[in-house]
Image (cartoon, rainbow, N blue to C red):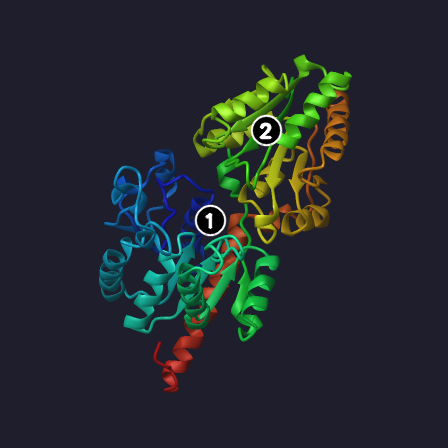
């Protein structure tokens, strides 16, 4: 398993996908060897995550550098040292270690997951050198069309060719939503539809063991866990809606709290603080630093409403935290454009979906949720079908992909039709 995001790295919820795959694959007959970076490279770490790595998993850590930090001069770096991502220097070290692991440990299948796309280039090189079958996992699209890389640039041409090579040469492809699967099949119409499989993110029931809310939500707390940015996950329309409701007397100030938990530099900035002051939301908006994953799950239980922010850049994706939100059972407020997230919430009959910038509609939704909370402070929703999104259930789907990919390659080799990679 070639992955940048693996404990103790904790900058992205993507670490949970790779970690949980490695935890549950042994139940389906696969013993994972994880090829990742040395711990000192990671700028954001949660050492508590390491205790969840099972004994059956062997982690192989190699050298590599972040070109935007380690190769920068006075805070600036050459763009080409970060193509396709800042960890491209990891490639030669990972390939060397990967070849040794494959030789010594009887590896049968290579699996890589992105972001970071360097992981796919490492896996492609290992496949080329060993002829082992390869499954490439895309948690997010590599090319964000019209946004990144910049249209018309040489970088876009280079990365598009790299993405196309991965799509063609990987023996199997996995993505996180049906919408992302459709996106890639439209982008590469020559791909056989059966080659691209959906393996959702999810929640791990084991993570919730022993976690009970310390209290019934005594405040109407709307909580967002995870990264917030002004470009793509903008909370300001929600702030305007809450300020309007407070001014009209539809919300009681002593009841209301908007909590942003581990949301990054934007909500910790003076710019955001000034917006809060201008809207007279002091004492209502609470910005809290990142906390360990297990403590985050406890905080989700204690909130009255769980918030999703999702703009047009992520229409094909479902935030991994949404599955944990649904497992907790508190009401979900999703400020999201039409796409994978609203579709899932409607299919499950869970959550309220509002257009992200529609302040009037947001205010209407918040008012309704507040009135429901006033009636029942401990409101929870049992979501039918949520068990199908457990990490164990989703890993069983990945195991089938690995089984089929390994069997197909073995059959081709037996019959002398294995092509050169």
Residue placed farthest to the front in the image? 152
Nearer to me, 59 or 357:
357
Question: Regarding mark 2 in the picture, which secondary structure is present there?
Answer: strand
Image height check: is 13 above or below 217? below
- Tell me the number on the disc at residue 223: 2
* Disc 1 target residue: 17
**257 on left or right of 252:** left
Callout 1 environment at 10 Å: few (<14), some (14 to 19), or many (20+)? Answer: many
Quarter placement of the C terminus: bottom left
Instruction: Kindly report the distance in space between the C-alpha atoms of the residues bearing marks 2 and 1.
Output: 22 Å
Where residue 324 appears, as percent x and y from the top left, is 56, 39
Position of residue 323 measured from the top left corner of the image (x, y, whole percent): 58, 43
Quarter holding the N terminus is: bottom left
Badge 2: few (under 14), some or many (20 or more) residues near its Cα, within 10 Å? Answer: many
Which residue is painted at 47% across and 26% down in the image? 269
Is residue 378 among the parts visible in the rendering?
A: no
Is residue 337 visible in the rendered image? The answer is yes
In the image, residue 269 above or below residue 163? above
Q: Is residue 212 above or below residue 336?
A: above
Residue 356: mark in rendering = none
């Amino acid at each position: 398993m070639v992955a940048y995001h693996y404990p103790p790295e904790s900058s992205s919820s993507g670490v949970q996908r790779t970690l949980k795959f490695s935890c549950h694959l042994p139940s389906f007959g696969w013993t994972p060897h994880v090829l990742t970076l040395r711990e000192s490279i990671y700028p954001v770490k949660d050492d508590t995550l390491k205790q969840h790595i099972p004994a059956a998993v062997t982690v192989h850590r190699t050298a590599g550098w972040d070109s935007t930090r380690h190769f920068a001069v006075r805070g600036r770096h050459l763009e080409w040292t970060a193509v396709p991502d800042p960890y491209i220097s990891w490639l030669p070290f990972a390939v060397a270690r990967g070849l040794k692991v494959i030789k010594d440990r009887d590896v049968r299948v290579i699996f890589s997951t992105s972001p970071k796309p360097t992981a796919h280039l490492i896996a492609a090189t290992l496949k080329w050198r060993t002829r082992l079958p390869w499954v490439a996992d895309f948690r997010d699209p590599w090319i964000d069309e019209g946004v990144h890389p910049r249209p018309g640039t040489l970088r876009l041409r280079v990365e598009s060719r790299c993405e196309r090579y991965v799509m063609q040469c990987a023996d199997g492809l996995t993505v996180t939503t049906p919408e992302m699967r459709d996106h890639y099949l439209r982008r590469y119409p020559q791909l056989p539809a059966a080659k691209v499989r959906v393996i959702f993110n999810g929640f791990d029931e084991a993570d919730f063991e022993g976690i009970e809310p310390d209290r019934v939500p005594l405040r109407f707390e709307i909580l967002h866990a995870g990264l917030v940015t002004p470009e793509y996950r903008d909370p300001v329309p929600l702030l305007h809606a809450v300020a309007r409701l407070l001014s009209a007397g539809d919300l009681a100030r002593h009841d209301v709290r908007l909590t942003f938990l581990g949301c990054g530099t934007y909500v910790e900035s003076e710019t955001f603080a000034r917006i809060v002051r201008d809207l007279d939301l002091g004492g209502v908006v609470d910005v809290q630093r990142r906390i360990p994953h297990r403590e985050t799950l406890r905080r989700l239980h204690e909130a009255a409403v769980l918030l999703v922010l999702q703009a047009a850049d992520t229409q094909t994706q479902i935030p991994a935290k949404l599955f944990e939100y649904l497992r907790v059972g508190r009401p979900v407020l999703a400020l999201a454009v039409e796409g994978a997230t609203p579709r899932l919430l409607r299919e499950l009959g869970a959550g309220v979906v509002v257009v992200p910038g529609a302040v009037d509609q947001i205010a209407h939704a918040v008012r309704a949720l507040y009135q429901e909370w006033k009636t029942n402070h401990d409101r929870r929703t049992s979501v039918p079908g949520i068990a199908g999104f457990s990490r164990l259930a989703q890993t069983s789907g990945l195991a089938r992909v690995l089984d089929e990919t390994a069997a197909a390659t073995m059959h081709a080799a037996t019959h002398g039709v294995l092509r050169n990679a």
